[in-house]
Amino acid sequence: MSKTIMLIHGAWLNSRAWEGFKARYEARGYTVLTPDWPYDDRSPAELRDSPREELKHLGQLQIIDHYDALIRGLAEEPILIGHSFGGVIVQHLLDRGLGAVGVAIDPAPTPGVPLGPQAIWSALPVLGDLFSWRKAKVMSRKFFKTRFAQTAPKDKADALYDRYIVPTPGKVYWDGIFLRAGRIRWDNPERAPLLLIGGSVDLIADASMTRAIYRKQSLAPSKTELRIFEGRSHWTGIDAGWEEVADYALDWALLNARSPKVVPISEALAA
């Protein structure tokens, strides 16, 4: 059984968004890795004040390849847990045969699955700017309060924005439209078990979209399950009650993770 967990963040956030999950999982004895996307490895305040020029040109495939390389350098197959676009990254990594098990929380639009109405509406601030493919975009405070984290306490919303929100490359959105990261093989026999988690009031990644991804992923022979949490938004990993989501994700992963891959002696000696 893997004792390594890799947490993969989505757009508009960096690894700080996982601070609660990381501490909770470490308290259970796991090694928890929270790698940032390339060029996201500073505090949110620093990233908002002076985003790296390279961030403007960062695309989906680069991000997926970044995590691919990190996983291949580990001593054991990790448990993969991703949120939002991180949930899409988890699906791509599983499709490459990586990971002992995967959990996609509030997965963003995934290739081959129709967008939900809320996802379309929430993408307009980026896709409505025809030049956003070469910009690092910054989420507005109004958008954060009304759509991204609409369930967060109103009197704490500004402080939450300041603590967690980072710029995101518009190219990530456009790459999704043009499928630049490629399609996922839904019936892939090499795919590890996968849990999809959605929120019933998510205004970024509709629960209907999570259900549609589940139906596609269920074509694979390995176990695929769906859990929709009532009353939870896209801010589910930080909002009140996040512990229930964190525990459900890890408990399911531990129960359903596949056996470690056996490396042939010839390959081990060659390495």
Image (cartoon, rainbow, N blue to C red):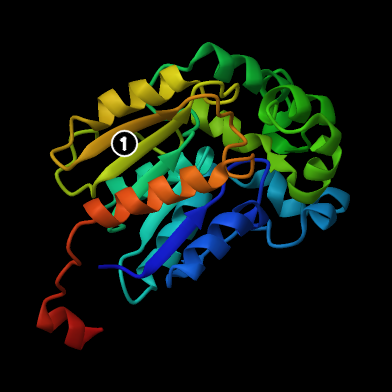
Q: Give coordinates of residue 14: x percent, y percent.
A: 65, 52
Circle 1 — which element?
Answer: loop
Identity of the residue furthest to the right in this view = 49
Dot 1 corresponds to which residue?
184
Q: Nearer the viewer, residue 57 or 15?
A: 15
Q: Residue at x 19, y 83 (%)?
A: 268
Q: Is residue 74 visible?
A: yes
As displayed, is residue 97 above or below residue 127? Answer: below
Q: Nearer the viewer, residue 269 or 91?
A: 91
Q: Is residue 140 visible?
A: no
For label 1, the crowd category at 10 Å Cα-Cα, with few meaning under 14, some 14 to 19 and many 20 or more, is some
Q: Amino acid at mark 1?
A: Ile
Q: Nearer the viewer, residue 131 or 51?
A: 51
23 relative position to 154: left or right: left
Q: Residue at x 77, y 59 (%)?
A: 43
Residue 151 falls in which quadrant of the image?
A: top right
As displayed, is residue 203 above or below residue 192? Answer: above
Q: Residue at x 38, y 73 (%)?
A: 74
Identity of the residue furthest to the bottom in this view = 269
Identity of the residue furthest to the top in this view = 117
Residue 78 falls in which quadrant of the image?
A: bottom left
As displayed, is residue 207 above or below residue 235? Answer: above
Q: Residue at x 52, y 51 (%)?
A: 63
Q: Give coordinates of residue 133: x percent, y percent.
A: 67, 33
